[in-house]
Amino acid sequence: MMPRNLSQLLTYLLLALFGVAAVAAGEPEGVAVFSDAIEVVDSLIPVPAGHGVRVRFPVGELKIRAADVESVATELEVRCGKLSAALCDKYRRKLRLAADSRDGVVEVRLVGLPKWKLRKLRLDGAVTVPSRAPLAVEVGIGDVDIWAGERDLAVRMGIGDLTVHVAPEQVRSVRAATRIGDAGVRGAEQAEGRRRFLLGAVLDWTGGEGAIDIALALRIGDAAVVLE
């Protein structure tokens, strides 16, 4: 598949470089594809009233959905790709989800492996969060889809594309910045980020009448808020 734009091209190039660096760090070369092993990690993490939620993943494809629930529910699929069966099992046994509650925020994060090892795995996560809780999301590499709830949303990403879905009557403002990539509002209202140094974009949209403020920051990738 050919990249659609400059940001995707740069993403592919950076991911390729990360793969070369991991091999140089001492992982076995020429191993057979071992993609049948799938580990599903489930967790249910209570969120006290008045607390916010922060989701942190260094690597992964994430779908995060706000719903009328009282806990954070997670499901994570881990596919090993081009790893031996023994190394795949070793990695999967170390990988886990951790949760901490501090300063009024419940933080859910992926732990157990360094980032360069995580990049050898394919991680697909589904996270459900309480719609009443403010939400912060931090992702290093990966594409993210978020269905916003009733409170403010803040997202910080390294490399990947981000799509936020929100009802038009709920959102008040969208502020987005990308170093390399596009930013825009789609749907009932349309707005495009202004170009910054020809590569990135800055969007400051305040056309909504709701109560949710959305703040997005990406290094490389496209950020879109879809009003639906």
Image (cartoon, rainbow, N blue to C red):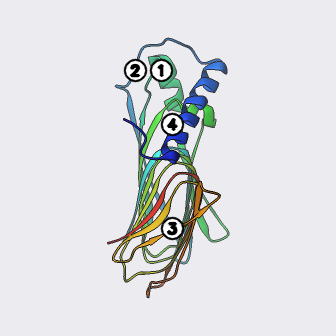
| Coordinates of residue 94 in the picture (x, y in percent) | 56, 33
Mark 3 vs mark 4: which is more N-terminal? 4
Task: Note whether residue 206 is visible.
Answer: yes
Marks 3 and 4: CB-CB under 8 Å?
A: no
Mark 2 vs mark 1: which is more N-terminal? 2
Q: State the residue position of label 4.
A: 12
Marks 2 and 1: CB-CB under 8 Å?
A: yes
* Residue found 49% across the figure and 77% down from its top: 151
Which amino acid, by three-letter code, is at mark 3? Val
Mark 3 Cα within 10 Å, few/some/many (few <14, many 20+)?
many
Mark 4 vs mark 1: which is more N-terminal? 4
Which amino acid, by three-letter code, is at mark 2? Phe
Mark 3 vs mark 1: which is more N-terminal? 3
Please tell me whether mark 3 sits on a helix, a strand or a loop.
loop
The residues tagged by marks 3 and 4 sit, at their Cα atoms, a distance apart of: 37 Å
Quadrant including the C terminus: bottom left
As drawn, 184 above or below 76: below
| Numbered label attached to residue 83 | 1
| Numbered label attached to residue 47 | 3
